[in-house]
Amino acid sequence: MAAIVITKENFNEVVLKSDKPVLVDFYATWCGPCKMQLPIVDSLAKELEGKAVIGKIDVDQEGELAQLFNVRSIPTLVAFKNGKVTKSGLGFHPKDRLIKMLGL
């Protein structure tokens, strides 16, 4: 299973109401580092299925969500637990760092 595409329509359900840790990748299709990050994010979605929720938000399509989380540079990765931001990071992150962000 690939990362879930998150929009303002499903954000509350997928991210804020999740009973599992959530990792969100804010990206853009034209961004070089984002293109490097996406395969790792999709791989994590498969690897952590049932343990965590892995999602991605296209900042060009979902500008309101990007603004809400002060995303000024991409990729930006944000970890949530119980509907609250627990960690965030800018730029490319290797898989092990993303797993640590999730607290797993």
Image (tube, grey):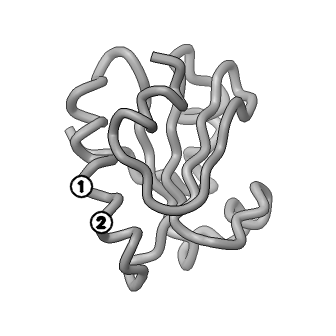
Mark 2: secondary structure: helix
Where residue 15 sits: x, y (%)? Answer: 59, 35
Specify the label residue 76 is tagged with: none
Asked if labels 1 and 2 touch by Cβ distance under 8 angstroms, the answer is yes
Residue 52 screen position, x and y as percent:
42, 23
Within 10 angstroms of label 2, few (less than 14), some, or many (20 or more) residues? some
Amino acid at the residue labelled 2: Met
Would you name the residue on which mark 2 appears?
36
Q: Residue at 41% across / 38% down in the picture? A: 54
**Quick one: 64 or 43, which is closer to the camera?**
43
Q: Residue 93, how many percent across, how many down? A: 43, 51
User: For the point 71% across and 27% down, which residue is it?
Assistant: 83
The amino acid on which the numbered mark 1 sits, given as a three-letter code, is: Pro
Between 72 and 63, the residue placed more toward the observer is 72
Residue 51 vs residue 103: left or right?
left
Q: Is residue 64 above or below residue 6?
A: below
Q: Quadrant of the N terminus?
A: top left
Q: Which residue is mark 1?
A: 39
Q: Is residue 84 left or right of residue 56?
A: right
**Mark 2 to mark 1: distance in Å?**
7 Å
Question: Quarter holding the C terminus?
Answer: top left
Residue at the extreme bottom of the image, as rendered: 30
Look at the picture and state if 102 lies above or below 6.
above
* Residue depicted at 22% across the width and 27% down the height: 47
Left or right of residue 28, residue 1 in this image: left
The picture places residue 78, in percent across and down from the top left corner, at 61, 44
